[in-house]
Image (cartoon, helix red, strand yellow):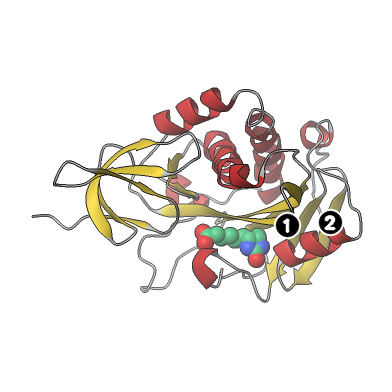
Amino acid sequence: MGPSLPMAEMLASRLGRPVHWTATTGSTNDDARRLAEAGAPSGTLVVADAQAAGRGRLGRAWYSPPGQNLYLSLVLRPGTRPEDTPLLCLAAGLGVAEALDLRVKWPNDVVDSSDRKVAGLLAEAEIQGLSVRYVVVGVGINVNQPSFPPEIPTAASLAMIRGSALDRWEILARVVPAMEARLTQVEDRRETVLAQWRQRSATLGRRVRAGGREGLALGLREDGALLLGLDGGAVEAILAGDVEPAPLR
Ligand code: BTN
């Protein structure tokens, strides 16, 4: 297990130093948390070939077979406020989408032009009082998985989209610096991150169901909340949950 290419690009940056490679683990997010608790520096990257207990958002499992996809987690010690954690995850997702030439779906998915999910992100912050001790950003990217079970018809891999297998390490070497570029803007160039996220969004401008409501996805608020225009004219900020296309009326 390990990269077959020199990852000069990735290693030249701050994120991805050091790298911990593992063959099979439970969850790279758990590994990254353990390393963070033991004092690992910001930028520490954990990559696994397979996960036995990969986690997704909202308590879901993240299917993580060996030899096909990318499962990675970054330890960040960002110096941002606890309430900025959703924005960090949006920024990281934007970086992933930019590196793969895909789109972002609120809150933390990366999708293709047919809205099929190619990657998902899960940020877990360790908060102490009013400050962030560390944040672990986990990313699962479907790279070479040939197909998905019928229960998840809205998933796809990069190989399914492009029609041929891709080198996972090349993808990793592209994705990590792209995430870094956006993550470093969260503190002092937040407007740029928000503007670029809006531009690359597969969510805004559509009628959706989110947070138990239905309406028009109007915008992305400063803190990363989704602004939903309800039918009566009110605008509601959705802070967490899933977004699905609203059924046709
Ligand atoms: C989601 O879309 O629900 C988020 C999925 C996040 C999956 C990644 S795989 C690497 C890291 N380790 C985990 O256990 N989860 C994240």
Secondary structure at badge 1 equals strand
Residue neighbourhood size for the residue with mark 2, other residues' Cα within 10 Å, grouped as few (<14), some (14–19), many (≥20): many
Secondary structure at badge 2 equals helix
Q: Quadrant of ligand 1?
A: bottom right
Q: Establish whether ligand 1 lies closer than 8 Å to the Cβ of label 1.
A: no
Q: Position of residue 84 (x, y in %)?
A: 60, 42
Q: What residue is shown with label 2?
A: 36
- Name the one closer to the observer, 236 or 14: 236
- Name the one closer to the observer, 203 or 175: 203
Tell me which numbered mark, 1 or 2, is placed earlier along the sequence.
Answer: 2
Residue displayed at 74% across by 53% down: 129
Res 183 quadrant in image: top right
Task: Please state if 163 lies on the left or on the right of 248 as rendered.
Answer: right
Q: Measure the C-alpha gap from mark 1 to mark 2.
A: 10 Å
**CB within 8 Å, label 1 to label 2:** yes
Q: Position of residue 195 (x, y in %)?
A: 46, 26
Please state which of the two labelled residues, at mark 1 or mark 2, is closer to the viewer.
1
Q: Is residue 45 above or below residue 92?
A: below
Residue 126, label in figure: 1
Q: Is residue 196 above or below residue 220?
A: above
- Name the one closer to the observer, 164 or 220: 220
Q: Position of residue 236 (x, y in %)?
A: 31, 46
Q: Is residue 140 above or below residue 187?
A: below
Q: Residue furthest left?
A: 249
